[in-house]
Amino acid sequence: MSLTLLTNARIVDGTADEPSAPMHVLIENDRIREVSESRITSGQARVIDLNGKTLMPGLIDCHVHVIAGLVNLGQNALLPDAIVAYHAARIMKGMLNRGFTTVRDVGGATSALVDALNQGLIEGPRLIVCGKALSQTGGHADFRGPYDNRSADYQTRRLGALGRICDGVEACRHAARDEIRQGAQFIKIMANGGVASPTDPIAFLGFSNDEIRAIVEEARNAQTYVSAHLYTDEAIARAVELGVRSVEHANLIESKTAALMKERGAIACPTLVTYEALKNEGESLGLPATSVAKIDDVRLRGLESLEIMQRAGVTMAFGTDLLGEMHRHQSEEFVIRGRVLPAAEVIRSATSNAAELIGMAGQIGIVAPGAYADLITVDGNPLADLSLLTNQGRHMPFIMKGGQFTKNELN
C-alpha cells in the first residue's frame, strides 16, 4: 500500500472564486482517501508540505488529436503507423508535463494507444477515445482533394487518419458499431464543414438527418453519446435537435441555439487556441492554402461565442484541437478564455465540467475522497493569474496521475 499525505494545500478546482483554506489530503494508492481542514495523522505516509501552494485536480482537455504529428492531416494519414505512434507518445508526454492528466481524443487515436498507456509502455494522460471520427464523402475527415480518386477506405485502418468515411444510414450504423467494437468510448461525427479539410466550406452540413439519428441511436444503445464537429448556428441547432450531446467548437453559435443547448443538456467544447495558432503558424508548418483561407471564417467569432453560451448557461468544457508542432500552445487556451470569462469558470471547464462531459464526474476533475489522485501543484494562485497554467508546466512543481508522481520538485 502506498500512502502520500499533502499538507497545507490551498485547493482551486473552479468551484469558488478564491482558493480554499489550507487543507490536508491523504492519498492511498491511486485514489484520494481523505480531505480535511483538520490535520491528518499517518505514520506510514510520505508527507509533502505544500506550504500554501495551490493544489488543483489534474487538468482535462476534451478535444485533442494525439495522432496529429503533422499539421497537414492529409499527409499525416499517409505516415507509417510506427511513426504516428512515436509522434503520439511524444505529444502525450508533453500534455502530461503541462498538467493534463486526462485527455479526450476526438478522432484518430485507437484503443491500442490506450492499452499502451495502461501497460506503461508509454507515458501520458489517461486517454479517452472515439476511434476514427465518422465523416461523409467530402466531409471534414475526407482529406482527398478534388483530383484524388483513391477509395476512401485507404484511411480507415491507418493510425494517422483522423476519420473514416461512411455514406447512407446502414453504412453509418455499421461504422458506429465497428468503432464501438474496437473500443471507442463515444462516437464522433463530422457534421459541418471544416478548416483543415480540402473540399468542404465551413457552411456545409455533414450527414443527412437520418444518418445522424442512426448514429445517435447506436451510441445510445451502447450507453454512450455522440460528439460532433460543428461551427455554424444552423448545423449546431440541427445536431442538438437530433440528439448530439457534445458540441465541438461552436464558434458561430447564436443565442437561440445556445438556449436550445441548455434546454437539451448539450455540452460545448470550444477550441479557440487552435485558430490563433493556425493563423500565426499554420502556413509555415504545412497547412494547405485552401485551409489557411478558411481560418478567419471561424476565428473572429470565437470570444463572442463564449459570451453567448455563458449568458445562456451552457456548460462548457476545455478543448484545444491543436496539430503538429502547435501542441505546445495547449495551455494558452486558459488565457484566451480568461479575456471574457471569470477565471473560476475557465478552470472549471478543465476540471468538473470536463469530467461531466467525459462521463467521469466525481472520479476526475475534483479533489475529494474516492476520486483518482490526479493532482497538480501550482506556484501562485491561478484564479488571479491564469498564465500560471502555461509555460509547459514551469509553474507546476509536482504532477501526479493515479497516485504516481510524474514530476516532483518538492521532495
Image (cartoon, grey):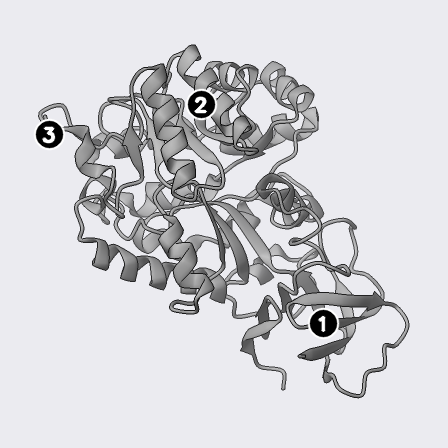
- Whole-number angstrom distance, CA of label 3 to CA of label 1: 54 Å
Residue 168 in percent (x, y) is at 32, 15
Q: Is residue 252 above or below residue 321?
A: above
> Quick one: quadrant of the C terminus?
bottom right
User: Which mark identifies residue 150?
Assistant: 3
Which residue is found at the position 66% from the left and 79% from the top? 2
Towards the viewer: 239 or 145 = 239
Q: Name the amino acid, label 2.
A: Ile
Q: Is residue 378 above or below residue 243?
A: below
Instruction: Looking at the image, tell me whether mark 3 or mark 1 is earlier in sequence order.
Output: 1
Q: Which of the marked residues, 2 or 3, is nearer the chain's N terminus?
A: 3
Q: Which residue is mark 2?
A: 215
Q: Is residue 281 visible?
A: yes
Q: CA distance from mark 1 to mark 2?
A: 41 Å
Tell me the distance, in whole angstroms, between the alpha carbons under discs 2 and 3.
26 Å
Please name the amino acid that badge 3 sits on: Arg
Q: Secondary structure at mark 2?
A: helix
Q: Amino acid at mark 1?
A: Ile
Q: x, y (%) of residue 92?
A: 41, 60
Q: Please say if the residues under marks 1 and 2 sit with CB atoms less than 8 Å apart.
A: no
Q: Badges 2 and 3: C-beta atoms under 8 Å apart? A: no
Disc on res. 27: 1
Image x and y of residue 255, in percent? 62, 18
- Tell which of 130 and 330 is nearer to you: 130
Task: Specify whether 296 is left or right of 33.
Answer: left
Q: Quadrant of the N terminus?
A: bottom right
Q: Secondary structure at mark 3?
A: loop
Secondary element type, mark 1: strand
Nearest-to-viewer mark from 1 and 2 = 2
Q: Which of the two residues, 68 or 379, is positioned nearer the viewer here?
A: 68
